[in-house]
C-alpha cells in the first residue's frame, strides 16, 4: 500500500515536471512568445516549474536549431530518475538498458498524450467566441499542426474535421508506439 501511494505521488510530480518541460520545448519549437512581458499567461508557470532543471542542463546541452534540447533532455532525465527510483524502491533488479528504454517510451507516450489534450482543449475552445487567455495560449501550439490537414480535408457543412483527423493520427502513432514497446521488453 505504501509503495502504491509513493508511486502515485511520484507519477504525479514527475508527470507535472516532465510534461511542463515538454510544453516548454514545444512552445520554443513553435516560436511562442515565452516572455512574461509578452502577455503569455502560461510563461510564469512554465518557468517556475522548469527553470530549476532546464537551466543547469542548458549549460551542457545546446539548442538544436529551434529545438530546445535542454528541455527535452530534462524531461527525459526526470522520467529516467523516476523509473530508477521506482525499480530500486520495489527491489526489482533490471538491466540499466531497461530503465533507459522504459523512460524513452514513457517520454514518447507523454508527448503524444500531451498533444492529444492540447488539440481537445483547442477544439473545445473553438466552440466559444470569446477571446480568452487559454485560447491565446493554445492557438500558436495547435494551429501549425492543423494547417496541413485543413489543406487535405474538405470542410463538411462548415465543420472543421482537422482536429478529429489529427487525433486519429495521434492514436495511430500510440498504437505503433505500444507495438514497438512490446517488442523491446527485456
Image (cartoon, helix red, strand yellow):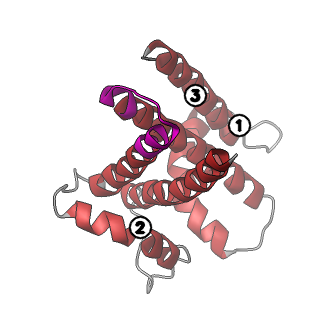
Residue 164 is labelled as 1
Name the residue carrying label 2.
Answer: 50
Residue 174 is labelled as 3
> What SS does tag 3 mark?
helix
Disc 3 to disc 1, C-alpha distance: 15 Å
Which secondary structure is most common in the magenta stretch?
Answer: helix
- What residue sits 55% from the left and 22% below the top? 178
Q: Which numbered disc, 3 or 2, marks the residue closer to the eye?
A: 2
Q: Mark 1 Cα within 10 Å, few/some/many (few <14, many 20+)?
A: some
Q: Does the segment drawn in magenta span residue 154? A: no
Disc 3 to disc 2, C-alpha distance: 26 Å
Estimate the x, y position of residue 70 in percent, counting from the top left. Answer: 28, 56
> What SS does tag 1 mark?
helix
Estimate the x, y position of residue 182 in percent, counting from the top left. Answer: 51, 16
Looking at the image, tell me whether mark 1 or mark 2 is earlier in sequence order: 2
Write down the region rendered in magenta: 83-99
Q: Do callouts 3 and 1 mark residues in contact (Cβ within 8 Å)? A: no
Residue 180 is labelled as none
- What residue sits 66% from the left and 30% below the top? 168
> Image check: 22 left or right of 63?
right
> Image check: 54 left or right of 147?
left
Judging depth in this view, the residue of 150 and 181 nearest the camera is: 181
> Image check: 158 left or right of 103?
right
Looking at the image, tell me whether mark 3 or mark 2 is earlier in sequence order: 2
Amino acid at each position: 500500500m505504501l509503495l502504491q501511494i509513493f508511486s502515485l505521488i511520484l507519477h504525479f510530480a514527475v508527470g507535472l515536471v516532465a510534461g511542463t518541460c515538454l510544453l516548454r520545448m514545444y512552445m520554443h519549437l513553435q516560436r511562442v512568445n515565452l516572455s512574461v512581458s509578452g502577455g503569455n499567461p502560461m510563461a510564469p508557470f512554465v518557468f517556475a516549474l522548469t527553470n530549476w532543471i532546464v537551466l543547469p542542463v542548458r549549460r551542457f546541452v545546446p539548442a538544436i536549431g529551434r529545438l530546445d534540447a535542454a528541455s527535452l533532455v530534462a524531461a527525459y532525465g526526470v522520467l529516467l530518475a523516476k523509473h530508477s527510483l521506482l525499480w530500486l524502491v520495489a527491489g526489482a533488479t533490471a538491466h540499466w538498458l531497461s530503465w533507459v528504454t522504459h523512460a524513452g517510451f514513457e517520454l514518447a507516450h507523454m508527448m503524444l498524450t500531451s498533444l492529444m489534450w492540447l488539440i481537445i482543449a483547442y477544439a473545445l475552445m473553438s466552440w466559444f467566441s470569446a477571446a480568452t487567455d487559454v485560447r491565446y495560449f493554445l492557438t500558436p501550439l495547435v494551429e501549425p499542426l492543423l494547417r496541413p490537414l485543413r489543406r487535405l480535408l474538405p470542410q463538411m457543412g462548415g465543420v472543421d474535421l482537422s482536429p478529429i483527423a489529427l487525433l486519429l493520427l495521434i492514436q495511430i502513432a500510440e498504437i505503433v508506439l505500444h507495438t514497438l514497446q512490446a517488442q523491446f521488453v527485456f
